[in-house]
Amino acid sequence: MQSHHKVLFQQAFTLHRQGKTREASKIYLDLIEEGNRSADVLHLYGLSLHELGDQSGALPYIKKAIAMAPDNSLYRKNLAVVFSKLGRTEDTVEQYRKILKIDPDNLEAHQSLAFHLRELRDHTAGLLHAERALELEPGHSATWNNAGNLLNDLGRIEDARLHYRKAVDHDPRNGQAWANLASVTKFRQPSEVALMEKVLCQGELSSTQEGQLCFALGKAWKDIGKPELAFPYYEKANRRVPSHFPWEQFETYVDDLGKLFQADTFAGYPRSKSTERPIFIVGMMRSGTSLVEQILSTHPALCGVGERPELARLIGNIPDYPKTLRQDTEPLTKIANTYRDLINPFKDTNTRSVDKMMTNFLHIGMISLLFPKAKIIHTERNPYAVGLSIFCQNFAKPQGWTSSLDDIGRYYTSYRKMMDHWAAHSPLEIHTVRYEELLSSFEKNTRDLFTYCEEEWPEDCLEFHENRNVVKTASNWQVRQPLNPDNREKWRAFEPYLTDLDKWV
């Protein structure tokens, strides 16, 4: 490196370490344009672009650095982070695995693989990496928590509970671990919440940690039967949840869908040639979608694939949709086949997929064009019970509208408007499963459900809670329990606190 370049590089590196990333990035680029394309300069320029939010721009520079120094674990780690930001989970996993070939005891690689393999539903491999990470650093609270998540998804509830307990033992400020522990625990005595309240009162928590701990405390007092103590904690928790939702854009989208898909216009739209028979479960959060997926997955010909975002992404790429559906739009058969291929890694071969992405209630019109043989199952539940359950839930990925009862009610109105529209105009029959009726008359409702899906009723579905398939949603603990008809009216204990829902429902 020329002396002039060394000075510039040191200047950029110092600025970078001081957090002056934009200034550093400019100097790195000047060096590259002057012919200094060393691995360090390429890597750091790519890293600066990543930190500035330009993931696509960062990618080629970090790749070039790795081509020059393929055994550099730091370069590969930062490439993995960029892939993760781009949603390329398989590429992320590949980089961390290459790091382990270089350094088999790399703690961060094991921790990251445990996290990302969960996203790929490879829980067995993920758990092996979590266990190895805990061998390398037994006191790492976040790893205990992540291992608990993997065990919870697999239905190993008692093991998950023990791991969450270890997580809070090692770091009482781990709010996510407290929330997870509460989600798999049935609290019975006020003494059981004393430690959580002590941690909260110590005041050493971030806003996020405090919110997560408040969700746990709300759950504890709710279990004990003290709604007057539980609800204030839920309110405090939700005040710490991001609550930015694009209402105007969302409600315009709903209106445009209603205008685009009318009974008399469906006949003029093109149809896919797909012969696939996927099943889509739609509805509000906390309305029983996970329960229905768990029931359906007891049938050997049906495979639950969880909440898959692929369909919405493919539909979102259709030009001018939903303002219009042009006849020269990308052939629907290609979209249908692309969805099928994307879903394949998540399902068994030669089985029908059961996709429970709830927001597909927006896409029933397109589903009817993409998959003329699809089945649509709509789960429905008392809106007050749904609203309360959403408000009390510590979602891993907040939706922007779940942290106030008023927003929940507003969202419910759009959902209800959309479902009423499809009931009147969709060419596909929509089968509704009412949560309360499912609890009170389980066998009849499950027989009706499988009849609609054109599958034989499996007696095993009566023991759906013994199903060992992976469940990654907020309901993963509940669907491992036998049905309790008393759950239908539990929301009424909180009825005095739900007045913000009245104007919407």
Image (spheres, rainbow, N blue to C red):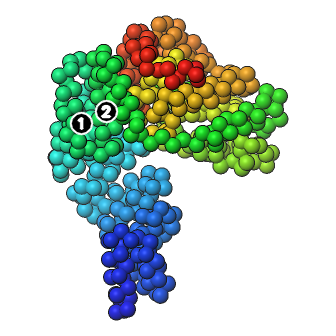
The residue at the point 24 percent across, 27 percent down is 158
Position in image of residue 373 (x %, y %): 67, 28
Asked if labels 1 and 2 touch by Cβ distance under 8 angstroms, the answer is yes
Provide the secondary structure element on which disc 2 rests.
helix
Amino acid on which disc 2 is placed:
Cys
Q: Which residue is mark 2?
A: 214
Is residue 431 left or right of 110 when viewed as pictured?
A: right
Q: Mark 1 packing: few (<14 Cα in 10 Å), some, or many (20+)?
A: many
Is residue 262 left or right of 303 when viewed as pictured?
A: right
- Comparing 430 with 121, the one in front is 430
Is residue 311 left or right of 106 when viewed as pictured?
A: right
Of the numbered discs in the image, which one, if any, rests on residue 406? none
> What quarter of the picture does the N terminus occupy?
bottom left
Q: Which residue is mark 1?
A: 200
- Comparing 469 with 89, the one in front is 89
Provide the secondary structure element on which disc 1 rests.
helix
Judge whether 481 appears above or below 3 on screen: above
> What quarter of the picture does the C terminus occupy?
top right
Q: Mark 2 packing: few (<14 Cα in 10 Å), some, or many (20+)?
A: many
Amino acid on which disc 1 is placed:
Leu
- Asked whether the viewer can see residue 323, the reply is yes
